[in-house]
Amino acid sequence: MSLRSTLDFLLYDWLHAESLSERERFADHSRETFDAVLDTCERIAREKYAPFNRTVDTQEPHFDGEKVILPKATHDAHKAFVESGMMSAAQDYEIGGMQLPYTVQAAANSFFAMASVSIGSNMLTSGNANLLMVHGTEMQKKVFALNEFSGRWAGTMCLSEPQAGSSLSDVATRAVPDGPDFEADPLGPRYRLTGNKMWISSGDHELTENIVHIVLAKIPDENGKLVPGTRGISLFIVPKRMVDTDGQLTGERNDVALAGLNHKLGWRGTTNTLLNFGEGKYPVDGRAGAVGYLVGQPGKGLHCMFHMMNEARIGVGTAAVMLGMAGYHASLEYAKARPQGRPAGPAGKDAARPQVRIIEHADVRRMLLAQKSYCEGALALELYCARLVDEQKTGSPEVADDARLLLEVLTPIAKSWPSEWCLEANSLAIQIHGGYGYTRDFPVEQYWRDNRLNMIHEGTHGIQAADLLGRKVLMEDGRGLTLLGARIADTISRAAALPALARHAESLGAALQRVASATKAAWSTGNPQEALANAVPYMQAFGHVVLAWIWLDVAERSLAGDASKSSAATAGRVGATDFFFNYELPKIGAWLNVVESRDPTCAALPEEAF
């Protein structure tokens, strides 16, 4: 099946996206306008992105001492994306948006991620602007967010520091008031920042006339000391080039300097940078210190930043899905064309018989079906999360609140599960190609390299797991977990009535109970160290249960319209569901065993024993 046909089924038959046009915000839209958006994005991705995926991998960004140089293909692709209007597709008409459902925007953006994730890394600009629309002042929205949505400026997220990594408590970048009248600046309270930020995606380039850095920093206390922990973190807008209140460049460069480019295993088409703030290379008003404008309240920066981080995490999950999907399609095409070997059994021993295509071998079919189950299932999960965003924004108060809490619980899964299992899909794609897959003559090795970042990107597996077991399943007295359980139970009830799915429904019910009991067992002593020692296996099991639910729901919907499985598409979805329940869901037992027993093996081993 093509990506487009898969998206059409998930959007219209499964998620009923067309019904969103009945809501006031989306009243100008219809299936026709949604399809037009998908058509446009599919065409741009096919013409401007896909042909140059290898180009941007081999022609890495380089710094000539003045500016970062990127291939012409990257500039052309970015220009086409901006002109499509997709940067602001879900925004209000009043600010140049289309008021498109986020569900449709997410589906449309998947074409770019599949064609070239290394070119199509615009998610941080969108997330940066969305953060400012929620937490910024009216002036900050007008000057910074709107210029990002238009594509005139780009945006970044500056959290990590060389000495701190993911430990935001140890952020050392300082922000001090810029003079006695610092609060009078119309762009927001004005500070001077000094410090270093690491791993900044798209931190420097010439694709846009300006770059809006969103930076975490600490404001010193009256004694000049930084407040320990995350309580002292504030959030600042730090433009690469200084601007006025009309959003025009003043001609002055802000004191933000490129210290170096990071050379990565994958995503080589995207600049990844170390930035120095306030080192004095570009003094503003004759003084060192990068000018930054406070967003929100002092000390509340992490609260604001989570708005962007959560959006970015779902974006990373989607990128992982589409890289896995690209590898799946490539290996499926290869398996259908590559002759090698003969069937098992007596007939296969006759060397005079012609070779069969490798898709006829059972083990190759196993690897293809695994990829299909991982990637199409994860795509459904990401679109389900996108639909929750629309429910949160346009549903009734009760529906919106439920969507908010479900999204909180599912975000760690939407980021972590595809980044692990769609990476495994890429590995299987290489395996299907055999030795050819390990060469640069075929694209699957690049897909794997690009995807390997996503288990680290926007929070490692360990961070996502601690968030899930340490916070998300406990928040609001476990109401989110209860809500999710109710939705899974509804799917189980519907699927149990279908002979083809009844056994799977029973298995999912047992798996759901097992996760609930493991959650209680993990926290039974009340000791976070014991509970979280096996947080990653917990998250892996939790994610597998969520994906089993997604597949069961998709299969039930597919059979509702084609009970006899007469179409190849229905047979494929039911087959992927069978595979996931028979080959994948049973794995949760091993993961949850160590969670339930609070197994101390890893935590207790003395350092010298490693």
Image (cartoon, rainbow, N blue to C red):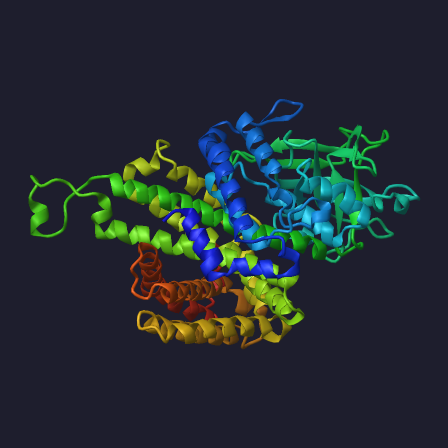
**Identity of the residue drawn at 51% across and 56% down:** 383
Asked whether 120 or 594 is in front, the reply is 120
Residue 594 in view of the camera: yes
Query: Whole-percent x and y of residue 387?
Result: 56, 59
In the image: residue 181, left or right of residue 157: right
**Identity of the residue drawn at 61% across and 37% down:** 82
In the image: residue 380, left or right of residue 253: left
Asked whether 232 or 427 is in front, the reply is 427
Query: Whole-percent x and y of residue 133?
Result: 73, 51
- How many marks are shown on the rendered structure? 0
- In this view, 539 is above or below 425: below
Query: Whole-percent x and y of residue 162?
Result: 63, 42
Query: Whole-percent x and y of residue 83?
Result: 61, 36
Asked whether 337 or 456 is in front, the reply is 337
Instruction: Identify the image quadrant of residue 523.
Output: bottom right
Instruction: Identify the image quadrant of residue 353.
Output: top left
Residue furthest to the right: 180
**Identity of the residue drawn at 69% across and 41% down:** 148
In the image: residue 150, left or right of residue 321: right
Residue 174 in view of the camera: no
- In this view, 202 is above or below 529: above
